[in-house]
């Protein structure tokens, strides 16, 4: 199956693209997809702990199972420290 | 009114969209791009469908939590120069205390959960800045 991976801000700059088509085995989880993306783009690795994951515009846990055509977003932290 | 737009924000239109006859208070917050020696503007990037959804959910939570009658949030994306408003939030409630509280809470939530990122644009190379 194929899913779309969306990347933003720092992650988009590291990967050099805001959207990637990714082919996966059926039953792949979001966490497994992220591991595959980090393996292909090692410069993302240091960011993995702070990454927020969304599927079809909703925040999900890494164990969520993906389905054909899903849009998976890897989101850098948006929390603002300075007020 | 919930919008994400490139154009300058019409503050009065945002306020008017939150007006209700049963609201005795409207608190308006403007988030502006602050001057800094190394900053000429901020570039905002958004994951729009998720941001719109998150903002709509945030407004419903504000209504449930504070008894807010209406809340409008408009955020700019793209380049916003120093002095420009990047976000405008108008919160209408029966009385000012809940309008102030809800406005403050909602802006914290906007910065915490809405997928919008900013990068400083200045004479030096771009770097990300916390919103």
Image: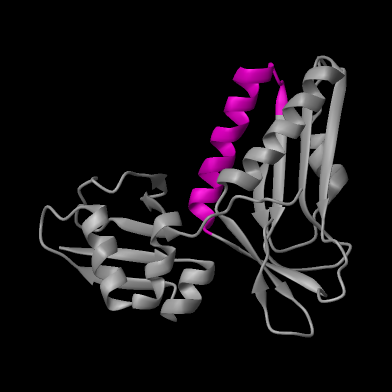
For residue A51, say whether it is visible.
no
Query: In the rendered image, which quarter contains the N terminus of chain B?
Result: top right
Question: Is B55 included in the stretch rendered in magenta?
Answer: yes
Magenta stretch, overall SS: helix
Location of residue B8 by image quarter? bottom right
Say whether residue B127 is left or right of residue B35: left
> Residue A76: horizontal and vertical position, in percent?
49, 60
Question: Is B109 included in the stretch rendered in magenta?
Answer: no
B119 w.r.t. A68: above or below: below
> Residue B32: horizontal and vertical position, in percent?
83, 55
For residue A42, say whether it is visible.
yes
- The magenta segment is B47-70
Residue at the (75%, 33%) spot, across then down: B104
Query: In the rendered image, which quarter contains the C terminus of chain B?
Result: bottom right
Residue at the (68%, 50%) spot, across then down: A81
Residue positioned most to the left: A26
A55 w.r.t. B83: above or below: above
> Residue B99: horizontal and vertical position, in percent?
79, 24
Residue at the (23%, 46%) spot, across then down: A63
Residue at the (83%, 75%) spot, across then down: B40
> Residue A73: horizontal and vertical position, in percent?
39, 58
């Amino acid at each position: 199956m194929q899913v779309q991976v969306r990347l933003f801000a720092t992650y988009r700059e590291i990967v050099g693209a805001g959207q990637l088509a990714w082919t996966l085995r059926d039953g792949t989880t979001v966490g497994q997809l992220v591991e595959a993306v980090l393996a292909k783009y090692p410069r993302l690795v240091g960011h993995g702990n702070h990454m927020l994951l969304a599927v079809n515009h909703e925040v999900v846990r890494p164990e969520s199972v993906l389905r054909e055509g899903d849009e998976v977003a890897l989101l850098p932290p948006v929390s603002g420290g300075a007020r | 009114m919930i919008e994400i737009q490139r154009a300058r924000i019409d503050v009065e239109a945002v306020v008017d969209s939150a007006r209700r006859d049963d609201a005795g208070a409207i608190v308006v917050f403007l988030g502006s791009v602050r001057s800094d020696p190394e900053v000429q503007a901020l570039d905002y990037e958004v994951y729009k469908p998720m941001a719109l959804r998150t903002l709509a959910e945030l407004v419903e939570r504000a209504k449930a939590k504070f008894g807010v009658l209406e809340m409008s949030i408009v955020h700019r994306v793209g380049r916003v120069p120093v002095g420009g408003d990047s976000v405008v939030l108008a919160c209408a409630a029966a009385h000012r205390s809940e309008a102030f509280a809800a406005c403050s809470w909602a802006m914290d939530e906007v910065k915490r959960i809405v997928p919008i990122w900013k990068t400083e644009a200045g004479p030096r190379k771009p770097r990300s800045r916390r919103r």
